[in-house]
Image: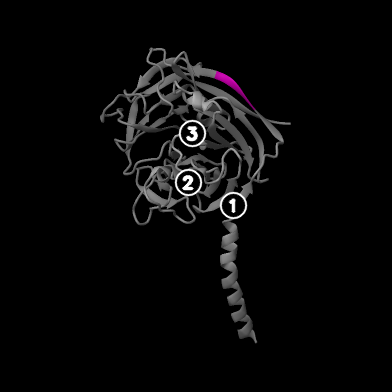
Amino acid sequence: MKEVNMRSLIAVSVFLVPLRCLFAHEPVIVSSVDPTHSIQIELICTLGDERGDGIVGPTYFVEQTDNYYFVASPSLPSCEVLIFNKKGEYTHTIGARGSGPGEFRFIRALRSTEDGLLYVFDQQNRRFTVFSTSHDPISTIRLSVNLKEKGVILLDDGSMVINAAIFTPSRIGFPLHMVNSGGSLGPPFGAINPRVVEAGREDSLWGIRWMCLGNSNEVWTTRYTNYEVECWSLDSLERTHHMVREADWFPVGIWDTDSELEPQPHMVDIRQNPDGLVLLLALIPDDEWRNNEEGFPEKDFDFRLEVYNPNEERIIAANTFDDHACCFLNSNHLVTCHTENGVPRLYVWEISILPE
């Protein structure tokens, strides 16, 4: 009798374990906003290059320390990092085009540390250059792979999380990878069922993960082509939260269509604030995009800011703004781009999330 019960128990267990795993992977579906808070933004300063050549191009990498803002763009032919004080005044540049110490060929990411160091990732030279608080190059970290845009998180112990497409048997299909302080690759993660698809426009964009460090030794991510939010533990490298947003302005599967002529909604950045709320930044097509003969990015897109409460599994605040957002600086500040008299300028805004 005991033997029969044991066999029955084993049979039931074998049946239930896959079901438990299956349900654990089911995402939270959020189809509407349940507003308990409002979002306000207030302009802090304007960044502009007073040398006369302006800040060029719709893609910017912006980072800050306590005393400075740092700006880089692939559209800058000089491959410099522009530096501004906290009043938004241009002060100087670091770097130049080349492969020598402190030089760059294609800047792909900027990151700063709490003690004021600046890390600049150069894709073509495949290295991080670390700059001191006085903006002198002090070390180089070689990396054998190319990052996705803005695809790095610096950790306190000197290691990193990177977003990269690496086509080796053990890493293909995984968008995230640990990297130690010397630049050597650690374990891959970031996918339950690693996806391998044919190369193409959607493929390259699908692999992009905007990332931020969470409050509990975790990484929060969202995808460029899908309004999908995931949280990954840095202790276990397992997914601990999964949310899919179903919104009329960001239809699921819209990037599966081949409509390159029309601007498509896409995610831009993600941050978690000290209260555990997750801030999400998206660009959505401006109603007037067809009249954008000048090609200004802010006339192609508006930006939408939403606040997700993962504990309550709902969007608690949302607002759409008539401007082009570039990124978050942190959970309290974001950067937008706007053109004044034909010259692009960057604007730093403070974010307030207020109970209604």
Give the side of residue 271 with respect to residue 128, left or right.
right
Q: Secondary structure at mark 1?
A: loop
Find the residue positioned furthest to the bottom.
1
Magenta span dominant secondary structure: strand
Q: Find residue 43 and report its horizontal and vertical position in percent.
A: 58, 20
Q: Which residues are magenta?
A: 40-44
* Mark 3 burial class by Cα count in 10 Å: few <14, some 14-19, many 20+: some
Residue 160 appears in the figure: no
Magenta run includes residue 33: no
According to the picture, the residue beneath numbered tag 2 turns out to be 256
Residue 3 vs 220, above or below: the answer is below
Going 56% across and 28% down the picture, which residue do you hit? 287
Q: Does residue 104 appear to the left or right of 320 in the view shown?
A: left
Dot 2 amino acid type: Asp
Q: Is there a contact, CB below 8 Å, between mark 2 and mark 3?
A: no
The local crowd at label 1, few if under 14, some if 14 to 19, many if 20 or more residues have their Cα within 10 Å, is some
List the residue tagged with mark 1: 27
Q: Earlier in the sequence, mark 1 or mark 3?
A: 1
Which mark identifies residue 263? 3
